[in-house]
Amino acid sequence: VLFRSTHKLATQVVNAVTSDDHRELAQRFRQEAQRNIQKEQYYLELSATYRRHPLRIDAVQNVSTADRYLRLADEARDAARADDQMATLQDKLAEGFVQAK
């Protein structure tokens, strides 16, 4: 589902030609950023839980379950930042269309 959503957004970015298109994209990227922030929080909570109550298998694994979720939280935070930057860029592109008229 994520790949399909990302692919669809990429297609919309390529096909955006009006200021309204760019504003809509900015909104979509903000929604994606918000979803990624929620994912980060979820992964941080799981990491804290597994740090307090480690699994037995963690004793023989190279990376603990808590550290795996911490890495996933970092990735979600990075994705949220990237989405937020794309939203800002789309806003600037929309403003450029308005100023050009």
Image (cartoon, helix red, strand yellow):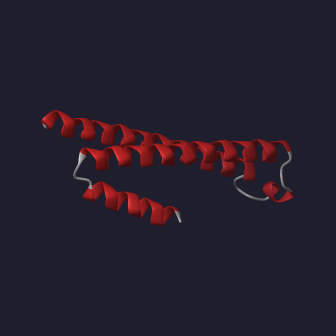
Q: Quadrant of residue 16?
A: bottom left
Query: Left of 34 or right of it: where is 87?
Result: left
Residue 100 percent across, percent down from the top left: 13, 36
Query: Left of 5 or right of it: where is 41?
Result: right
Quarter of the image that includes the C terminus? top left
Residue placed at 25% from the left, 40% from the top? 93
Residue placed at 51% from the left, 61% from the top? 2
Query: In the figure, 95 relative to 61: above or below?
Result: above
Query: Left of 1 or right of it: where is 53?
Result: right
Q: Nearer the viewer, residue 97 or 82?
A: 97
Query: Left of 101 or right of it: where is 48?
Result: right
Residue 95 percent across, percent down from the top left: 25, 35
Residue placed at 31% from the left, 54% from the top? 13
Residue 41 percent across, percent down from the top left: 66, 42
Q: Quadrant of residue 83?
A: top left
Q: Quadrant of residue 12?
A: bottom left
Q: Nearer the viewer, residue 3 or 72?
A: 3
Residue 3 percent across, percent down from the top left: 47, 64
